Image: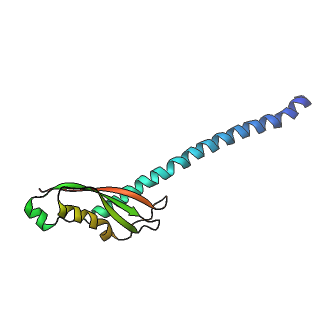
Amino acid sequence: MTMQTLHKAPARLARVILARLLLACALLAGMLTATPALAQSDWSRQVARIISSKQTYPATAQMRGEEGTAKVKVYVGADGSVQRTELATGSGSPLLDREALAMPTRAGRLPAPPGGATVLTVPVTWKLI
């Protein structure tokens, strides 16, 4: 090796390290971008399960043979508290709609959303067997 080659070696090594570092940063940035979306969808599924666990079939609606799906918009605070609920789509039965609106409140405090306060729409279905 000549003296000139030895002087170029650290510069070449620095370029290789920099290129690898930039690639690693790009990969890491891509992973960090995908993580909140994944966390949000996991949270949404968990909250929908919690709310669904509070579902009851109103006796009067059962006796009348009422069935349907209501979509409830749930406003969740950053701390997981249910701020309010709205009926996004009615089921066709006022009794079932009332039940759908009451379910999130009965669930109590929910897990805190990963991205702060948010709105989630939860479908609730009643079907007679």
Give coordinates of residue 40: x percent, y percent.
44, 54
Q: Nearer the viewer, residue 127 or 88?
A: 88
What colour scheme does the image use? rainbow
Give coordinates of residue 21: x percent, y percent.
68, 42
Residue occupying the point 64% across, 44% down? 25
Q: Residue furthest right?
A: 3
Residue occupying the point 44% across, 66% down? 77
Total numbered badges shown on the rendered structure = 0
Q: Is residue 128 left or right of residue 119?
A: left
Give coordinates of residue 82: x percent, y percent.
38, 67
Q: Is residue 125 left or right of residue 105?
A: left
Q: Quadrant of the C terminus?
A: bottom left
Give coordinates of residue 119: x percent, y percent.
40, 58
Residue occupying the point 67% across, 41% down? 22
Q: Quadrant of the N terminus?
A: top right
Image quadrant where residue 50 sits: bottom left
Residue occupying the point 85% across, 32% down? 8
Q: Nearer the viewer, residue 9 or 80?
A: 80
Q: Is residue 63 left or right of residue 10?
A: left
Q: Is residue 42 left or right of residue 123?
A: right
